[in-house]
Amino acid sequence: MNLFTLLEHAALRFPAHGAVFHGERLVQRYADLRHRALMFAAGLRGLGLSAERVAIASENCPQYVELLFGIWAAEAAAVPVNAKLHPREMAQIIEDAGARLLIASEKIAAQLSASPGAGLPAACRVIVIGSEAYDALFGEPAPVPTGTAADTLAWLFYTSGTTGRSKGAMLSHRNLMAMTIAHLADVDSIEDGDSQVHAAPMSHGSGLYIPAYIARGARQVVPLSGSFDPAEFIGLCSAHPRCGAFLAPTMVQRLRLEAERSGARPAGLRTIVYGGGPMYVEELRKSMAVFGQVFVQIYGQGESPMTITWLPRRDHALDDPAVLGSVGRARTGLAVRVVDAQGQDLPYGGIGEIVCSGDTIMRGYWNNPAATAETLDRGWLRTGDMGSFDERGYLTLRDRSKDVIISGGSNIYPREVEEALLLLPGVVEACVVGQRDEEWGEIVVAYVVAKPDVTQQMLDTHCVARIARFKRPKHYVFVPELPKNSYGKVLKRELRGQPCS
């Protein structure tokens, strides 16, 4: 089993179909993409990198697709690196992965070279995308791989590192094929000629959906900006047919605001898959009012890539706040449970840790047996997320286990407080954290991005009317923006370190 077979089959069926676009410009047809990937595979084999790890550090670019499939055709493993990391963080990932080749954009290669102490391993060669050395890697095409074991490492997925040093989740061809099949079964009905717009990082969520679109002979559309620009996204979704995209919730909000400001609508928009952070009910309703029933939610982790639960578009149409506030039901091929500290299943409504099992679950963490043993328990992935099921099978996330606030002996789930705050007109964003307190153990602190006319008294009165008094924030801190990583996740650890009064 090798993911390259997805491209092989698509190229046989749709050789003349457009495969990769840069903005509106066609870069490669399917026959061309297949040929380029096999040429790159031959280049890697010539460097002795079969069954090795090959790192990619680049903003979104058209070459990303040929790189991934070329690496898989060589039976090597891709190590996509977040392009927005600090050079030292990039170097740490590359060193940990033991990569002897880094394919980098010109900008990132320059940053790594110029950053004192970045410390790329001496054994790691750097080749810049588009350079003569890059072109030299493409020679006579390699044969199509036919004997790859299903558990061969395909993607070394490094966690976002919001809580410390990144860990490399080992994702095999089996894991990623199961993820792809589950996407096509549950999330989206993709046809040849449809389009995927890579607005989110191709090193992360957007890149993980490349195989599903390749499997159906669809287009890969890379924005000229190499990132997410709401106006550019709207234009691309009008220029390409039946567009789908993976967006973080913060990106959905930015897209809505741009559409409302400009009056422009993405005419060819088919599907927005959102995930990677909380999508609050009020924002979701506003976005559905602008874009219609195009939304599908997924809940997953790098350890079970993009695949634990899903909330389909038909459930969005119910406009049931309990459903919209959930992350949906278990995905095809996944068993999902909520358990107590002893690993016993909890009844409906009981809040515990979410665990899951299935073919998408990682093999373990690269070079980290201690973290692997802590996270994988007899075939079950311990997500570290707290949640509860209702009688209909909908799973609601409460918070990361480490984010639960224990105040005066009572558990307080920040998301519930955040949802309440966002119902107040004028509140744009909110993040709730716990801070140490001698009397209560922890107290609730809310960091709020709001319009100028919103006051602390308004926030307090609003919360008292909607949630229990013990859950009400003790302090409200107005901030111009919330700190986020490149995937749109709020960095709660940075807020915990800030003064609250």
Image (spheres, rainbow, N blue to C red):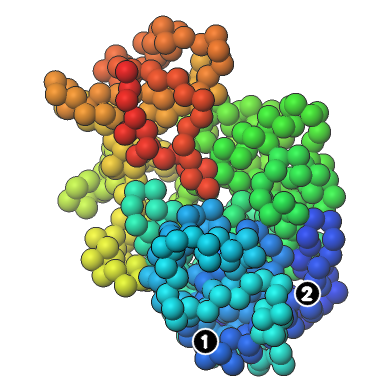
> In the image, what residue type sits under mark 2?
Tyr
Q: Is 83 left or right of 30, judged from the image as shown?
A: left
Residue 282, by quadrant, is top right
Residue closest to the eye, 69 or 423: 69
Residue beneath disc 2: 30
**CA separation in Å, label 1 and label 2:** 25 Å
Label 2 sits on a secondary structure element that is: helix
Query: Which quarter shows the N terminus?
Result: bottom right
Disc 1 is placed on an element classified as loop
In the visual, does 368 lie left or right of 254?
Answer: left
User: Residue 69 in the image: x percent, y percent?
Assistant: 63, 76
Instruction: Give the total of numbered labels.
Output: 2
Residue 194, image x, y percentages? 77, 58
Q: Nearer the viewer, residue 323 or 274?
A: 274
Query: Is residue 459 in view?
Result: yes
Which residue: 37% across, 62% down? Answer: 167
In front of the other: 113 or 294: 113
- Marked residue nearer the N-terminal end (1 or 2): 2
How busy is the neighbourhood of tag 2: few (under 14 within 10 Å), some, or many (20 plus)?
A: many
User: In the drawing, does residue 175 fall left or right of residue 107?
Assistant: left
Seen at 29% across and 35% down, the residue is: 404
Q: Position of residue 456 (x, y in %)?
A: 42, 10
10 Å crowding of disc 1: few (<14), some (14-19), many (20+): many
Who's the residue at 37% across and 37% down the image? 494
Residue at position x 42%, y 29% from top?
431
x, y percent for residue 143 = 65, 93
> Does residue 82 sit above or below 171 in this rendering?
above
Residue at the spot of label 1: 49
With respect to residue 6, does 24 lie above or below?
A: above
In this rendering, does residue 319 appear at all?
no
Amino acid identity at mark 1: Leu
Q: Are marks 1 and 2 in contact (CB under 8 Å)?
A: no
